[in-house]
Amino acid sequence: MTDEQPNNPLHGITLERVVTELSEHYGWAGLAQRVNINCFKNEPSVKSSLKFLRRTPWARAEVEALYVDTFN
């Protein structure tokens, strides 16, 4: 029961951690180049990004895919 989702690379990783690690790795400008959404371009913050990504499934999917490609 320790590996309930062995094929899910994001299992146990919060969206906040995803956004924080990506912004630290690429910077907000680099992140905006890779994922074209305004919350990364105009006055970016983790809080505003989380609010947008939780309401927008396509953007969240792109950010999560970038995280998997970058760190896995």
Image: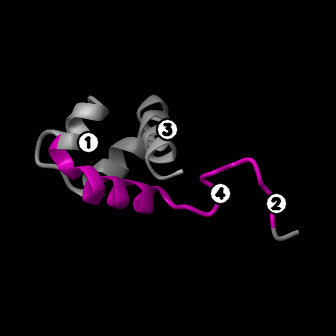
- Disc with the residue nearer the chain's start (1 vs 2): 2
Residue under numbered circle 1: 31
Q: Nearer the viewer, residue 19 or 66?
A: 66
Mark 2 and mark 4 in contact? Answer it, CB < 8 Å: yes
Residue at the outermost bottom position: 2
Q: Horizontal placement of 48 versus 14: left or right? A: left
- Disc with the residue nearer the chain's start (4 vs 1): 4
Q: Amino acid at mark 2?
A: Glu
In the image, what residue occupies the spot 55% across and 61% down?
Answer: 13
Q: CA distance from mark 4 to mark 1?
A: 22 Å
Determine whether the residue tagged by mark 4 lies in a helix, strand or loop: loop
Q: CA distance from mark 3 to mark 1?
A: 13 Å
Residue under numbered circle 2: 4
Residue 19 part of the magenta segment: yes
In the image, what residue occupies the spot 88% across and 69% down?
Answer: 1
Q: CA distance from mark 1 to mark 2?
A: 31 Å
Residue under numbered circle 3: 65
Mark 4 and mark 1 in contact? Answer it, CB < 8 Å: no
What span is in magenta? 3-29
